[in-house]
Image: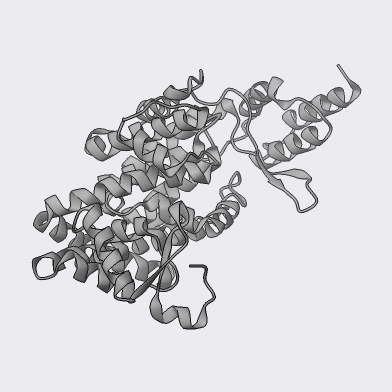
Amino acid sequence: MKNSEILVENSMCRIFSKLKYKTAVFIQLLKVSSKMGYNMDERTNEWMINLRKVGVEVRKFDYMKLADRLWDGEVVSYIAKIHECKGRQELFTRQKPVELERLIEIARVQSTEASNKIEGIVTTSTRIKQLMNEKTTPKSRDESEIVGYRDVLNTIHESHDFIPIRTAYILQLHRDLLKHAGLSYGGQFKNTQNYINETKADGTVVTRFIPLSPYETEQAIEAICESYRRTLAMETVDPLILIPTFISDFLCIHPFNDGNGRMSRLLTLLLLYQNGYEVGKYISIEKQIEKTKDAYYDVLERIDYGWHEEENDPTPFIKYMLQVILACYKEFEERVGLMSEKNRSTVYDVVKNYVTEKIGKFTGAEVIAACPIGSRSAVLNALNKLTKEEIIVKCGSGRGTFYVRKDAMENENLPQ
């Protein structure tokens, strides 16, 4: 054993023989030993066992405490607006079940593409659509992981009311997420310590947060699941508060060797659907997160401050997720409004209404997604007619084709 290892080992022994230190002390020692080049993974479990022997308690989870908190006006306002949207959503789904099927297909593709893109897992838009429609097989590790996300997303869409929030089911979803990638650890909790690292401007990498050790992971996941179920059953905490809190703890536990971010977003959809907030079926929540990923990363950095000591505040993450959900509901209602014009308007009328209110450039694919009232060819024909009428201008060519409003060309120097 090296001198540095002996030093850390002796330091641990002295702590074990004294008072009941908080878990935070243990985490600091792990950080120090990491900087000294000491391999923590070999003795982490042994150290955690010793901590338990001397009575050091690890992080506890009691979501019933959320009922005693006073939430600021911003949180209360978001929740009230989402509740109103939820009522209208239920009315829309009863009145237009067939029309909404088009939105579901678009959202499935966007959700799979966006959630994987956040993690740097990408392929072309054409390949994404082929994979989603099961018209091709994966040709790379990235595409294999995309197919795994597709499968789990489909399971949640079709069977969300029959997926209990329990450890075994979370492991099964993780297994399916990674099964096409051929990874041996799919469906298993992490077996090595993971770290949340940050890369500084000068390129140096520092450990910003150390999640729970592998030894503590299964117990912690069981604890948050049990507390979530118990609190939800008591109906003392609004699900829109409870769900982001559960997800923030899941992310701080970081229970898997790989796939934690994607699992967190899939679980978010599952919990929302189970509580009647089904907007994610029609408008991609993952795409909204990907569009606001800078804010997403910012709140993720903030939720782990003081987490091991149970002093963290989930409010920033709660507010962010409420904003995302509300934005999706607003987009949903806008698209349903466009569909309702089908009874009195042609495809041309609806497309014209959309493009004349559009600021900046837009593509044909964006118009097709935003105007789900006709076939793809009908929407493209409407765009061609609007171009001939000089209401919009077609710019670029091939895959680089986009459109802008004619009146915007007066102040823009765009390629044609």
Residue 6 seen anywhere in this rendered image of the structure:
yes
Q: Quadrant of residue 115?
A: top left
Residue 250 seen anywhere in this rendered image of the structure:
no
Rendered position, 344 above or below 92: below
In the depicted view, which residue is nearer to us: 395 or 150?
395
Q: Is residue 317 left or right of residue 334?
A: right
In the depicted view, which residue is nearer to us: 114 or 225?
114
Rendered position, 350 above or below 293: below
* Residue 337 x %, y %: 20, 67
For the point 69% across and 24% down, the residue is 41
* Residue 399 x %, y %: 45, 52
Quadrant position of the N terminus in the picture: top right
* Residue 103 x %, y %: 25, 52
In the rendered picture of this protein, how many numbered marks are placed on residues? 0
For the point 27% across and 52% down, the residue is 282
For the point 56% across and 48% down, the residue is 310
Q: Is residue 352 left or right of residue 321?
A: left
Rendered position, 395 above or below 98: below
